[in-house]
Amino acid sequence: MKSSRYVSDSAVLRELGVRLAAQRLTLNLTQAQLAAQAGLAKRTVERLESGSSTQLSAFLRVCRVLGLQERLDLLVPEPAPSPVAQLRLKGRTRKRASRQSADAGIGEPKPKRWTWEP
């Protein structure tokens, strides 16, 4: 995303949403799982991924005034699928998290839910 001061907020928000969704899918998380682990509502994750977050729009405006919008690529880099993932997808883009197999949770600690600690 080559963001500049001339790119609209909605275009930047859409691209950030696409990148967030791609990263979530890379980690094989559903929107509900991500929301639970982040301490958010699922609807909030949906809004972030669709690019319709008003809070993020305000954040972009502040970044634009401070001259930081060009650095958003560092914050949320463009995802690069692995060669194995490219072969599996056969040119398509991934849309959903895959089902967790019954053996996937054995021996792995359950992710801790995020909580606010003052």
Image: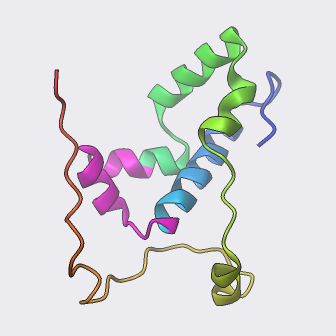
Coordinates of residue 43 in the picture (x, y in percent): 33, 49
Which residue is found at the position 31% from the left and 88% from the top? 101
The answer to whether 99 is drawn above or below residue 76 in the figure is below
The answer to whether 63 is drawn above or below residue 97 in the figure is above
Coordinates of residue 113 in the picture (x, y in percent): 19, 50
Which residue is found at the position 44% from the left and 46% from the top? 47
- How many tags in the picture? 0
Front position in the image: 81 or 52: 81
Magenta segment = 26-46
Q: Is residue 17 left or right of residue 90?
A: left
The C terminus lies in which quarter of the figure?
top left
Q: Does 37 lie within the magenta span?
A: yes
Q: Is residue 100 left or right of residue 7?
A: left
Coordinates of residue 2 in the picture (x, y in percent): 81, 38
The answer to whether 34 is drawn above or below residue 84 in the figure is above
The quadrant where residue 67 appears: top right
Main SS of the magenta segment? helix
Q: Is residue 80 left or right of residue 96?
A: right
Which residue is found at the position 26% from the left and 89% from the top? 103
Coordinates of residue 62 in the picture (x, y in percent): 59, 14
Q: Residue furthest top?
A: 66
Front position in the image: 81 or 22: 81
Q: Residue furthest front?
A: 107
The N terminus lies in which quarter of the figure?
top right
Q: Does 84 lie within the magenta span?
A: no
Which residue is found at the position 56% from the left and 48% from the top? 17
Applied colour scheme:
rainbow
The quadrant where residue 68 appears: top right
The quadrant where residue 84 appears: bottom right
